[in-house]
Amino acid sequence: MNQIFTKEIRVLVFTGLFLRALISIFYFHVTLFPDSEGYLFLAEKILNFDLNSYNGERTPGYPLFIALALGSTTLTVVYQVILGIVTSIYWFKTILKLNFDSKSALYITLFLQSFLQIHFYERIILVESLTLFLVSVLFYYLASDYLESKSLKKDFTLGLVLGFLVLIKPFYAFIPFIIYGFSLIKNFKISRIINSKLIILFFPLVSYFGWSYVNKINTGYFVSTTFFGLNLSQNCVYFAEKTSQDYLWIGTVYATHRDKLIDGNSKLESHLKADIAMTIWDAENELLPKTKGNFAKLSAELGDYAKETIKMNPLEYIKQVLFRSWFDFWKPKIYWDYDSFSLPLVNKMFLGIWYLQTIMIWFFKASFVLLIPYYFILFLKNHNITKELVITTIVFLASVLQALVTYGDNARFSFPFEYIMMLIVILFFRKNILIKKNRPEV
């Protein structure tokens, strides 16, 4: 047991429990956001073993997790807190695999675990804590020289992790293809194209297409989530009315609601302003009667509208993707119920801590963005596939792909990758500054 629960891991477990208990004194309740309702509804249907006529709005990964808590939001949060501590252990082991000593790995893990957004996500019925855990397992395997591994057991385990990740958020379906692609490029041989690492593609594809088929049966639309078309249309918010004649019935209503929100925001303080990115959700109630209350059909129409409108306004779309959606991916953001702390003024104390941490997160994320071209150029120069290159590629593609498909809450796509961005920056600093500085001159 001492070999498993080393001194460092015991410190992580104790510190993790203490910190979470301390936060619970001031913020002891489950937080629900608008998205929470959809997850809880599907969890209830899963517990009743009845998916008939489900509207397909959510994928079943996170609702399955809630179902394991018997539908209890309190027990779900307890599970998320436990997962948070296990996640910190994976971070510690990942840092060790990146050739840090145990002491440094412990200090870095404690530093990464100190950021408030991690702990407040654990208290919310949203997918982020579970996603963070699975992403952390994924990067642990990549840091453990997975590309060179010939272990069928590792392939199978990672395939299951990626498959469940896709069940939580279909967006992550691109990741196994990146990993498989890098495994082929590294020491490329024609004979290696068909190998055991195809397993990591199998489970995510089954998850994606299997759930899409369930939605096809229930809604008539073969999509991983019936929100897809609506989410895609969010990219058109600033040029909503510039559409074809066939979709003016959407564009006109969309633009009217956008202008109404913009006008209302001009009279409000900044913290009270509505998010313009969510305009289509306001317009949904007015548009829904056009499809006789069929949300799946409306979302499909919105998807077609978005494709047509983007095709007609390519420059506006590129501007939207680069300067709004992609930029928002890198923004630090915390989700909490600011007015629900148990003691007065404590929320202001936590807000002050978060402001300081926001500055640190901006520093690490800006540094990471600057390192993206560095690792790509290094690869082109040396043709060497490093762990840093693989990790950087996954995060960069995540930032680009999410910007292409949606606008609104983009920072939530970034959250599961924040810790690994910080690790990449710390690793670069150690390799290129500390080691070189301490290397004796000959």
Image (tube, grey):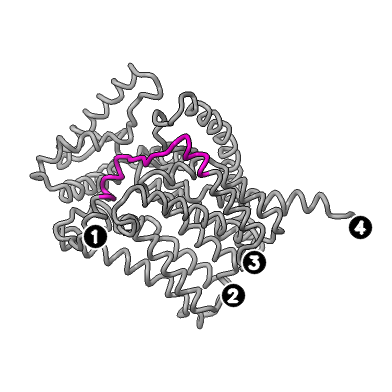
Please give the residue where the numbered disc 3 appears in the rendered image: 2
Magenta range is: 20-40
Q: Are marks 3 and 2 in contact (CB under 8 Å)?
A: no
x and y percentages locating residue 116 in the rendered image: 51, 40
Frontmost of labels 1 and 3 is 3
Q: Would residue 183 be found to the left or right of residue 283 on screen?
A: right
Vertically, is 272 above or below 415? above
Q: Residue at x 50, y 62 (%)?
A: 138
Of mark 3 and mark 4, the one earlier in the sequence is: 3
Amino acid at dot 4: Val
At label 2, counting other C-alpha atoms closer than 10 Å, the crowd grade (few under 14, some 14-19, many 20 or more) is few
Residue 442 marker: 4
Amino acid at dot 1: Ile
- Number of numbered discs: 4
Q: Which SS class for mark 3?
A: loop
Could you tell me how far apart the alpha carbons at marks 2 and 1 are, in whole angstroms?
45 Å
Vertically, is 75 above or below 333? below
Of mark 2 and mark 4, the one earlier in the sequence is: 2
x and y percentages locating residue 80 in the rendered image: 43, 52
Residue 194 marker: none
Q: Residue at x 20, y 34 (%)?
A: 283
Residue 46 marker: 1
Q: Which SS class for mark 4?
A: loop
Please give the residue where the numbered disc 2 appears in the rendered image: 187
Amino acid at dot 2: Asn
Vertically, is 242 above or below 4? above
